[in-house]
Amino acid sequence: MPITDEQKEHLTFLLETGEQLEAVQYAQESLGLNAEQALAFVKRLEDEIKTQDELEFDAIRVEHEKISTNLPRMLGMIFSTIGLILLGLGLFFGNREYNFGKRAERISGKVLAYEKVINYDSAGRPMTMFAPLIEYQLQGKTIQYHSTTSYSNPPYEVDELVPLLVDPAHPREPEIDSFFDRWFLTTLLSFIGLIFTAAGYVIMRFL
């Protein structure tokens, strides 16, 4: 007598819950089998369930192994991608700064005063920074510039002369001619980019 999906589902439930005897009795009553036939039928069904469970376990294990194998590669690619992006940004800002230096005029300016700027550290604590107010002469005009760069300690004395770079096309946008003001961002982005790129390579190559 053919077994229906409902009967097979109920027998499977009984076997999975450890009710083998009830499964044999149910097979006898619902399928019209004698005790020997019902026992053999339930045994075959139990073997099928075990085989299916083993196949499902093997599939899960294989998938887990794939994930474990690919995880270092994925992490390495993420680190390398971030590193290359940062290196690209460093190259962009570095190239922009280089071109600015080529077309800019070198002049001197005088520090008139410092403006206090409140910043916050990583813990959310306020820090007092100092941004210089610089006065300079260009094209017969006296111009004052509020620096967009602030310092934890004033790097110059008031009335001290500081070197400036000024693009004649944008005379009100000078730049202090120091390594920090010109190349800090480029150096920082490139350094972090190199670390991330190298870390990505090591992860993909050795893990």
Image (spheres, grey):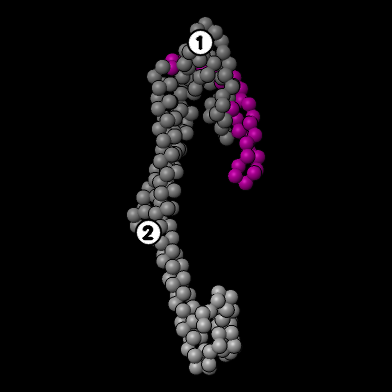
Q: Give percent across and percent down for residue 31.
A: 55, 85
Q: Up-down: is 42 above or below 88?
A: below
Q: Under tag 2, what secondary structure?
A: loop
Q: Is residue 66 above or below residue 156?
A: below
Q: Which residue is mark 1?
A: 138
What residue range appears in magenta? 104-131
**Residue placed at 57% from the left, 30% from the top?**
150
* Residue under the image location 44 percent in, 77 percent down: 51
- Residue assigned mark 2: 207
- Residue type for callout 1: Leu
Residue most toward the left?
A: 205
Q: Nearer the viewer, mark 2 or mark 1?
A: 2
**Observer-nearest of 23 and 148:** 23
> Within 10 angstroms of label 1, few (less than 14), some, or many (20 or more) residues?
some
Q: In the rendered view, tell whether residue 204 sits above or below residue 183.
A: below
Q: Nearer the viewer, residue 95 or 77?
A: 77
- Quadrant for residue 135, please give it: top right
Circle count: 2
